[in-house]
Structures are given as structure tokens and as C-alpha cells.
Amino acid sequence: MKGISAKISKALQVGSYLKCADNSGAKLLQIIAVKGYKGVKRRHPRAGVGDIVYCSVKKGDPKVRKQVVMAVIVRQKKEYRRANGMRVKFEDNAAVLINEKREPRGSEIKGPIAKEVVERFPSIGKIATIVV
């Protein structure tokens, strides 16, 4: 996976709830695992903007509810620092569902997404309306 230019603070841990920012049918997601996380014993895996997480769909269409899906975090409330010194934070924690090829499942994304996500996942940037 490609590196990110910013120093992302890992603000979301296993058990955190996220809004689903696309039109795939899911509304509310809960993080159950972080892909590629290697940590210390008994420490909760953490994730930030641009990370891939495995989520359980808690609210949404009956077809996608109670499924385990892969998602990319596109917004987080906790501020993080970019290379130019600017600090960025969003109003909510949100993610976009992806498939095994790391392409978005939905066809449009609601709300702004972070520039760091577009660096790592250009296919998500193509369907985004606002990139901050």
C-alpha cells in the first residue's frame, strides 16, 4: 500500500462506530478489525484516515445488514497534521465500502473526504464530490 504524506493520528479503535459515506446501502458501521495492524499484546488495534478496516454493518438495507465488509476511513474527528504544518479535522468519523480490488462499492460519496485517501486510493477520488 502506498505511503501517505501526512502524520495521521490513529483515532479509531476496534469497536468504534462510523458513518457510511457512500450509497452502497449501509448507514452505520462498527470496526471489528484493522487490516495490516501489528501491535503489542492486549492493545486495541487502531486506525486513522486512509486505513483499511473490516466492519460489521449495524444499520442499513436488509441485504447488507449483519455482513462483514471492507472499508476505507475517509474522515475522522481527531485532528491530524499535514507535511506543510496545517492541521485537519472533520465533523464526524466516516468510511467508504470497498471490494477486494480496493475499488468503491457505491457510485457516489456524500460529504468531503481527505486528500490523503485520494493519494492512496485514486478510484475513491474519482467519485468524490469534495476533496479537502
Image (cartoon, rainbow, N blue to C red):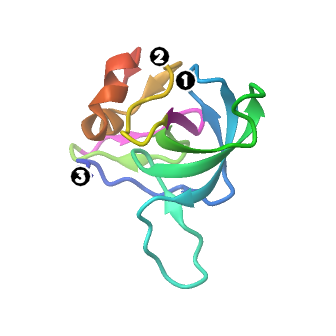
Q: Amino acid at mark 3?
A: Gly
**Above-or-below relation of 11 to 114:** below
Check residue 92 for magenta coloring: yes
Spot occupied by residue 23 in the image (x, y as percentages of width and height):
58, 19
Q: Amino acid at mark 1?
A: Asp
Spot occupied by residue 132 in the image (x, y as percentages of width and height):
36, 26
Check residue 18 for magenta coloring: no
Q: Earlier in the sequence, mark 2 or mark 1?
A: 1
Q: Earlier in the sequence, mark 1 or mark 3?
A: 3
Query: Crowding near pointer 2: few (<14 within 10 Å), some, many (20+)?
Result: few
- Report which residue position mark 3 lands on: 3
Q: Residue at x 69, y 29 (%)?
A: 27
Query: Crowding near pointer 1: few (<14 within 10 Å), some, many (20+)?
Result: many
Spot occupied by residue 29 in the image (x, y as percentages of width and height):
67, 41
Mark number, residue 22: 1
Decide: marks 2, 1 in contact (CB < 8 A)?
Answer: yes
Q: Secondary structure at mark 2?
A: loop
Which residue occupies the foreground of this view, 62 or 86? 62
Q: Amino acid at mark 2?
A: Ser
Measure the C-alpha gap from mark 1 to mark 3: 24 Å
**Above-or-below relation of 36 to 83:** below
The range drawn in magenta is 85-97
